[in-house]
């Protein structure tokens, strides 16, 4: 069941078309990464989805929106640079937004304590937010986005500002959050997307240039390539493989030989046979699976 | 309603944490009380500064208690207005500029509650400060001159408070309609000033103008009775407050929170 449907979403800034017509759906319970280089339009897209910005054209339809189109009870949003009331403590801020999100005083208190624990800042709960570090603010930001248990949580670059440890922890947090709610988060870091997300939307210059599940993407961009690593490489190996009927081209780097082939399944059988016949000392045999980075470079480059 | 209370309590708490509950009332006390004190001690003050030239006989008649209290009010309509505008101009524009407004309003918060809670918080501060300050002025005037009847004190307090409420609402309106606190403050001050000047100059044409309320409150103290136009001016003031608040919500809602 799809939670949001977006059709022909556009945004102009002073005549500049920043978002050039997006069409996509978000399924309930999925974790979707909005991936793209800086300036691709990720933040603008999230702002339009959260209602902070009005689209120039297009339709955003949420299932469960109120009659006047208000969707704010359904969503939680973390901006790229979250801002709080510096004079409040983290605990106070969470209770405040919890109550604004419709929790009772008691619920807000319990939920705040639970979330402070979850995001790992309960030691600092009574400290003024003004004294928080960047990483702590980011964590508090995630907590405030999910406090009212929204159906869709939108996070704008939740891990970009964090150090490697913080990044690790927040990604694990997202992993856990996936079980409860739908997550849409933007990032320009491929590994993050690859790690936690089921689906990916590639945004480039205001357009979706590629989308799908990780498997889909891999399959679509799979190249018929076999990587071979030998303990000791000889010239014979190179020449034999180079002149093999299935080989299109070959790349030799040290002990590694990458062979681009015409038919990967056939090549697997043939090569393995060849290797055992010749008794070459093989260390590693790998059918290429393209990394997200390769896909990224490929779609962005075109 | 509970959401409105949450927002309202936050405003009260914020003003507590940034000490507005302390310094605004104190300023109002100082501004007001300085009037009866300087009027009473003026002869001594002149003497201690070297006095008047030998032989000059200048008789300074002691002012009436009503005039002293009225001049206390006139302090509030200049410096008091300045404090209110400077203290309120950022309540909405400032939150939007910092980005915290977007954090709050992306939650299911009604725009009307958001703005009206801020208005109500500032309103409470203004009326509280005015009451404390004006009451002290009344007390000192009573001690040093004559006692003004408590009924007149309250009537003039309410009338004057209504004028300050108009000023406050204008400031809130520009704070919601404009992006920068400074601009909101500047325009609000300019409007309060222009309104006072125009209605002072054309007082026979603009009897119903809310800015006359300050003058009517003083008139009550000096003359002893309220001018006939007090009621229409009060009604116009209330109407203006309601319209401005409604417009604030309307304009604020139309704006994008992120840009």
Image (cartoon, coloured by chain):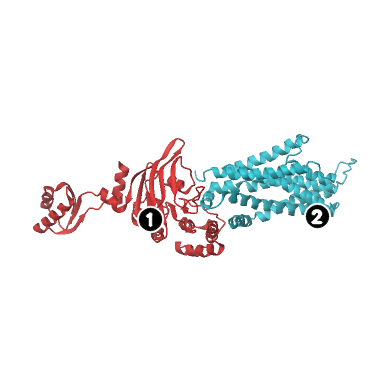
Q: Position of residue B238 (x, y in %)?
A: 70, 45
Q: Quick one: label 1, few (<14), some, or many (20+) residues within 10 Å?
A: many
- Where disc 2 sits, the SS reads helix
Name the one closer to the observer, B228 or B154: B228
Q: Position of residue A42 (x, y in %)?
A: 41, 46
Q: Is residue B146 above or below residue B202?
A: below
Left or right of residue A226: residue B115: right
Task: Give the chain letter for red.
Answer: A
Q: Quick one: label 2, few (<14), some, or many (20+) residues within 10 Å?
A: some
Q: Quadrant of the N terminus of chain A?
A: bottom left
The residue to which callout 1 is attached is: A30
Q: Position of residue A228 (x, y in %)?
A: 18, 54
Distance between the alpha carbons at the discs numbered 2 and 1? 69 Å
Chain letter, disc 1 residue: A
Q: Is residue B84 above or below residue A148?
A: above
Left or right of residue A220: residue B30: right
Residue A17 location, quadrant: top left
Q: Marks 2 and 1: same chain?
A: no
Query: Which tag is nearer the camera, tag 2 or tag 1?
Result: 1
Task: Give the chain letter for cyan.
Answer: B
């Amino acid at each position: 069941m799809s939670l949001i449907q977006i059709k022909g979403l556009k945004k102009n800034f002073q005549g500049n078309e920043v978002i050039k017509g997006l069409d996509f759906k978000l399924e309930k319970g999925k974790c979707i990464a909005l991936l793209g280089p800086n300036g691709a339009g990720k933040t603008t897209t999230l702002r339009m989805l959260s209602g902070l910005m009005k689209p120039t054209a297009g339709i955003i339809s949420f299932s469960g929106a109120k009659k006047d189109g208000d969707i704010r009870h359904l969503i939680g949003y973390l901006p790229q640079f979250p801002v709080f009331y510096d004079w409040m403590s983290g605990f106070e801020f969470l209770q405040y937004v919890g109550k604004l999100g419709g929790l009772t005083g008691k619920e807000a208190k319990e939920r705040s304590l639970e979330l402070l624990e979850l995001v790992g800042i309960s030691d600092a709960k009574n400290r003024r937010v003004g004294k928080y570090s960047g990483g702590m603010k980011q964590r508090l930001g995630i907590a405030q986005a999910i406090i009212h248990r929204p159906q869709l949580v939108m996070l704008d670059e939740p891990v970009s500002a964090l150090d490697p440890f913080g990044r690790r922890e927040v990604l694990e947090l997202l992993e856990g959050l996936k079980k409860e709610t739908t997550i849409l988060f933007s990032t320009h870091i491929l590994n993050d997307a690859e790690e936690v997300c089921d689906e990916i939307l590639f945004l480039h210059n205001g357009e979706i240039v590629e989308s799908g599940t990780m498997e889909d993407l891999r399959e679509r961009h799979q190249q018929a390539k076999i990587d071979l690593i030998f303990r000791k490489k000889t010239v014979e190996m190179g020449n034999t493989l180079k002149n093999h009927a299935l080989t299109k081209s070959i790349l030799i780097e040290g002990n590694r030989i990458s062979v681009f082939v015409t038919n990967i399944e056939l090549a697997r059988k043939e090569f393995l046979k060849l290797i055992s016949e010749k008794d070459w000392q093989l260390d590693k045999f790998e059918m290429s699976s393209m990394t997200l980075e390769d896909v990224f470079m490929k779609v962005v480059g075109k | 309603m509970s959401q409105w209370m949450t927002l309202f309590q936050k405003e009260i708490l914020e003003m507590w944490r940034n000490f507005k509950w302390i310094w605004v009332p104190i300023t109002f006390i100082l501004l007001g009380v300085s009037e009866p004190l300087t009027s009473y001690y003026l002869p001594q003050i002149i003497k201690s500064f070297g006095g008047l030239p030998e032989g000059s006989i200048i008789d300074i008649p002691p002012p009436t208690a009503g005039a002293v209290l009225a001049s206390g009010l006139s302090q509030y309509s200049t410096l008091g207005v300045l404090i209110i505008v400077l203290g309120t101009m950022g309540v909405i524009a400032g939150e939007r500029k910092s980005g915290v407004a977007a954090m709050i309003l992306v939650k299911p918060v009604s725009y009307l509650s958001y703005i009206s809670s801020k208005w109500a918080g500032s309103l409470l501060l203004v009326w509280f400060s005015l009451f404390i300050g004006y009451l002290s002025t009344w007390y000192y005037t009573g001690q040093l001159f004559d006692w003004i009847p408590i009924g007149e004190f309250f009537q003039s307090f309410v009338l004057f408070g209504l004028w300050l409420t108009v000023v406050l609402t204008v400031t809130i309106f520009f704070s919601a309609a404009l992006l920068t606190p400074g601009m909101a403050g500047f325009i609000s001050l300019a409007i309060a000033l222009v309104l006072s000047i125009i209605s002072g100059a054309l007082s026979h044409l603009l009897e119903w103008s809310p800015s006359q309320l300050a003058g009517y409150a003083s008139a009550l103290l000096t003359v002893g009775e309220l001018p006939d136009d007090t009621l229409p001016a009060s009604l116009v003031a209330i109407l203006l407050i309601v319209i401005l608040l409604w417009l604030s919500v309307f304009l604020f809602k139309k704006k994008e929170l992120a840009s």
